[in-house]
Image: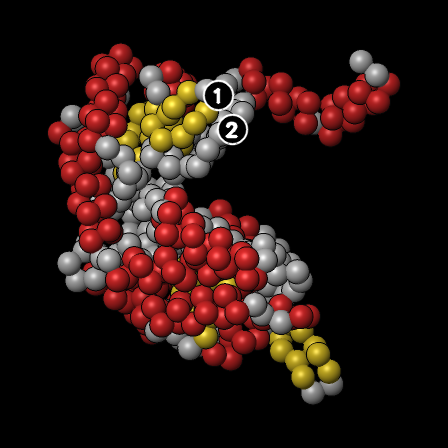
Amino acid sequence: MTITDTRADDVSEHWGFRRLVRDAELHGYAYEPPVLDGASGAVIQYDGRELVNFASCSFLAMHVRPDVGFHFASAAARYGLATGGSRMIQGAVRPHVELEAELCRITGKERSLSFASGMLANVGFVHAMSRAARLGRSVSIDNGDTVFVLDRESHWSMWKACDSLRYGERLFSFAHNDPESLDKVLDRLVGRRVVVMFESVYSADGSVAPVGALIDVCERHGALSYVDDANGFLVYGPPNRPFHEEFQALRRVTFHMVSFSKSVGLEGGGIAGPRDFVYAFEGLAGTSSFTATMQPPTASAATVIMKLIQERPGIVDDFLARSEKFRDHLVELGCVVNETPSYITSVLIGEDDKAEAVRREFAAKGFLVPVFRYPAVRRNRAGMRLMLNVEHSDEHIARFFDVLAALRNKHRF
């Protein structure tokens, strides 16, 4: 070991990271992410092995379609692989403008703005809506008194966006998917400017928000509403699909945020809403004006995919039908699953150590199965979060159920 290595170890020990890593390894919390040697999809290549993958959020496999890849390559040849700078300095690239126009058409909003990720959209939104800015003597805005009210189960990125706000002063929460709880919170905030933030579909438990009822409460109290639709975008909405009423109500939300990493299958995000607000977000959000956005060919491919999903509804219809059948089979086996029958299915395992053992044994049998345990969920309420992929074969699913049955018998969950 060199002197430099010794000093690095001492510094790591001083700051607590050496102890954290050591204790995490001792107690089974250490996890080295697998390195994929190919595209993420229904089957992944990992360490010379093939694993059937139930962890991918690109469940429609749009990112590996040859026609989408060809379009991406064509757009890359025309626009390059990077924007080359902030849109506030050198301007927006055509693919982003076209993507934002399509997002407005889908959501019914007046204007939209794209971001490099859904998280950056959430962070930028809260920053723009919670700060004061003075551009000149007669050009200013002051949102330094804005109050944010979040569903308690909101995604980490939404809570992270509110990090600088003191809880109980400018930040409050309401019980998960509970309009009455929201109503009581807003009753205490009469006279204040309020933004209510919640998700459409929650990734941790697959639950779907009562969107219309929550927006009713917001409108009654004069609060603005912001829905993170990362998991529901272009999956739900049509009359023949589940949760039609909930997703029709999204037309009434003030701000509609989407992530392109789920149904669209590409990195990026966007916010659609009232014209003046979103126009101002160009400068006030920070996460749009002071950093790069989506690659131009990614933005162009995302627009193509959004149109493809709408023009060929059978892609999502078939996916949802298979997801429902998959969930029904889990129930028939006696698994304890999440209450809401969305395409995200959670299977309760229980003890954290048992869940980790189940994950490892699934991997040994050729399956990548994501397990959520503490601190992602309450202690000893660990479980698997399962999402089908359109490219999963019947054989993949049958083998999964065979392994699941054996592990349930062994570990008693």
Vertical placement of residue 223 versus 26, above or below: below
> Badge 2 local density, few (<14 within 10 Å), some, or many (20+)?
few
Residue 22 visible in this rendered orientation of the protein: yes
What residue is drawn where x is 41% and y is 62%? 303
Residue type of the residue flagged with mark 2: Val
Quarter of the image that includes the C terminus: top left
Front position in the image: 233 or 340: 233
Does 150 sit above or below residue 10?
Answer: below
Residue at figure coordinates x 84%, y 22% from the top left? 4
Q: Looking at the picture, which amino acid does disc 1 mark?
A: Asp
Label 2 and label 1: CA atoms lie apart by 7 Å
- Looking at the picture, how far across and down is residue 194, in whole percent? 47, 69
Which residue corresponds to mark 2? Answer: 35
Secondary structure under the numbered disc 2 in the rendered image? loop
State the residue at coordinates (68%, 22%).
18
Q: Do the numbered discs 2 and 1 sit on residues whose CB atoms are within 8 Å? A: yes
Q: Position of residue 184 (x, y in %)?
A: 36, 62
Residue 181 coordinates in the image, percent (x, y): 34, 57
Nearest the eye: 18 or 316: 316
Please name the residue that numbered disc 1 is placed on.
47
Q: Residue at x 47, y 79 (%)?
A: 275
